[in-house]
Image (cartoon, rainbow, N blue to C red):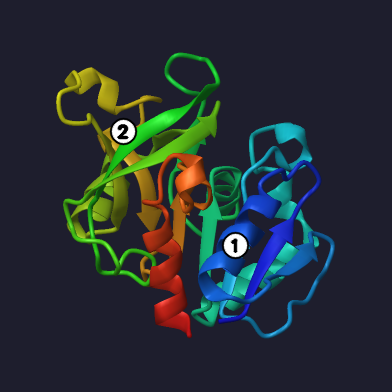
Amino acid sequence: MRAAIIHFPGTNREKDAIAALKQVSGKEPLLVWHKESELPEVDLILLPGGYAFGDYLRPGAMAAQSPVMSEIKRQAARGVAIIGICNGFQVLTEAGLLPGALLRNAGLRFICRDVTLQVETSNSIFTRSYQRGQLLRMPIAHQDGNYFADEATLDRLEGEERIAFRYVAAPGEPEESGNPNGSLHGIAGILSENRRVLGMMPHPEDAIDPLQGSTEGRGLFESMVKALA
């Protein structure tokens, strides 16, 4: 599997993503600067977390206008797998590759902690190593992770099984602790119509090694490597 990681000014999780992909796939991914207008032939494009362009205007809004995004849209139309994590998810919604928007957290504060996720579908190249209903522990680190969409879009996401991950309370925790940012329907990650594009706010790249406190993000990378090898 050949992967490319897109680097915008302000990106700060590209090294984490490189380490995760290299550890699971055994191959060094390409690091591509946002001003590039073409990409080499790759199987996966990853947009990492951070603060692209300082999150001016709206998180992801300026990055969505970068030259490389026209090429990413072309690659998406060809069916190339694309994943956006945290700020990368925001970029994908701003670019129109995923529906909805990421708003300011309900508490109006930056949140950095572990959360519990429920896998809502195993029917994707990103989640096939998990079981539907499986609980995962991963970290979040964001200020604008509150997923919003109109009712018609939410109904479509639910009906087409395109919600990949949902925030839930861990066993023994109060129910209100399960949604850290106010996301509608507890949405933590969604899929595109063709199920080849995933956007998610939690950081699976920071949950693949025991030293990170969790290895439950590893399944996502293993799913991609197996599907795209």
Instruction: Kindly indicate the quadrant of the structure image that contains residue 198.
Output: bottom left
With 35 as the anchor, is 15 left or right in this view?
Answer: left
For the residues marked 1 and 2, what is the alpha-carbon distance in whole angstroms? 25 Å
Instruction: Give how far across and how far down residue 92 sits, in percent.
Output: 56, 54
Q: What residue type is labelled 1?
A: Leu
Residue drawn at 32 percent across, 69 percent down? 124
Instruction: Give how far across and how far down residue 74 sits, in percent.
Output: 62, 76
**How packed is label 2: few (under 14 Cα within 10 Å), some, or many (20 or more)?**
some
Residue 60 lies, with reference to residue 227, above or below; the image says above
- Mark 2: secondary structure: helix
With 189 as the anchor, is 60 left or right in this view?
Answer: right
Q: What residue type is labelled 2?
A: Leu
Instruction: Give how far across and how far down residue 189 sits, in percent.
Output: 38, 48
Residue drawn at 21 percent across, 51 percent down? 158
**How packed is label 1: few (under 14 Cα within 10 Å), some, or many (20 or more)?**
many
For the N terminus, give its image quadrant: bottom right
Answer whether residue 196 is visible to the viewer in this image.
no
Which residue position is annotated with label 1?
Answer: 46
Residue 102 lies, with reference to residue 196, above or below; the image says above
Which residue position is annotated with label 2?
Answer: 184
Seen from the viewer's position, the closer of residues 71 and 212 is: 212
Answer whether residue 167 is visible to the viewer in this image.
yes
Residue drawn at 18 percent across, 18 percent down? 174
Q: Which of marks 1 and 2 is in front?
A: 1
- Tell me which label, 1 or 2, sits earlier in the chain: 1
